[in-house]
Image (cartoon, rainbow, N blue to C red):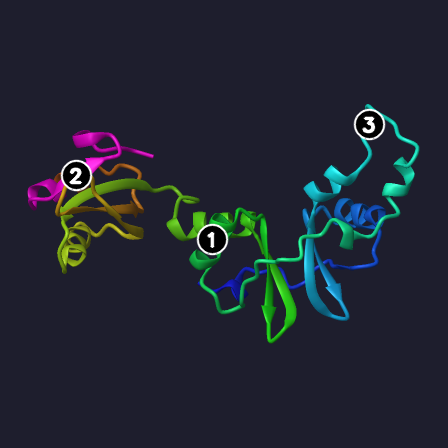
Amino acid sequence: MRIEEIMRKRVVTVNTTTTIGEALMLLRGNRIRHLPVLDEGKLVGIVSDRDLRDALPSTLIRHDDDNEVLKKKVKEIMHPDVVTAHPLDFIEDAAKMIYDHKVGSLPVVEEGRLVGIVTESDILNRLVELFGVHKPSSHIEVEVDDRIGMLAEVSQVFRAEQVNVSSVIAWPSTNPGKKKLIFRVQTIDPRRIEGSLRAAGFTVTGPLGEGGSRS
């Protein structure tokens, strides 16, 4: 899935001369947490709700220049080094960028133009849907040899049992020469399919060990 499929195309932005007070009202009025900063249509920075909170006067200690803070420009507190995404990036790549750079959003830029924005919440929500955990289903882990064709072999058991697979993830095992195949399957009671997997010679490992699980 590409970023263009989940990004928000209506982006609330500010420019470098927008005041901190104005930016704060935009965040609150639109119930958002990030404001890309533009200069003559070009993305030059980003400011978050946390940046604004850090810049605001303390509610406990008053200073003579408290009101002046709200009149300062966002260019004084914005982050100029913006981590961006492209509309054709895959969402897992965008998730990695957010993870690596510890940011809460990615402005989406195409040919130098800001065309959207995607937040960590947008990506998390879509990943939950892709993994199939937003619908009634069960989690099954199978440990297999780390060699070509193992996924196809395990899948034959699901096919024979006529159990639909919502998602599958390959994960390294702690045992040398092994890997884990983590399935989300569209059945509430996985015991029958787990029994069939064991009968076919596969090792069902979790999430609750040999007894399998229901979730």
Q: Amino acid at mark 2?
A: Val
Mark 1 or 3, closer to the camera? 3
Residue 160 place in picture, x, y as percent: 15, 53
Residue 33 place in picture, x, y as percent: 68, 47
* Badge 1: residue crowd in 10 Å (few <14, some 14–19, many ≥20): some
The structure residue drawn at horizontal position 93% and vertical position 32%, both measured from the top left corner, is: 64
Tell me which numbered mark, 2 or 3, is placed earlier along the sequence.
3
Magenta-highlighted residues: 196-215
The secondary element bearing badge 2 is classed as: strand
> Mark 3 and mark 2 in contact (Cβ < 8 Å)?
no
Tell me which numbered mark, 1 or 3, is placed earlier along the sequence.
3
Query: Mark 3 = which residue?
Result: 59
The secondary element bearing badge 1 is classed as: helix
Gap in angstroms between the C-alphas marked 2 and 3: 56 Å
The secondary element bearing badge 3 is classed as: loop
Query: Mark 1 = which residue?
Result: 95
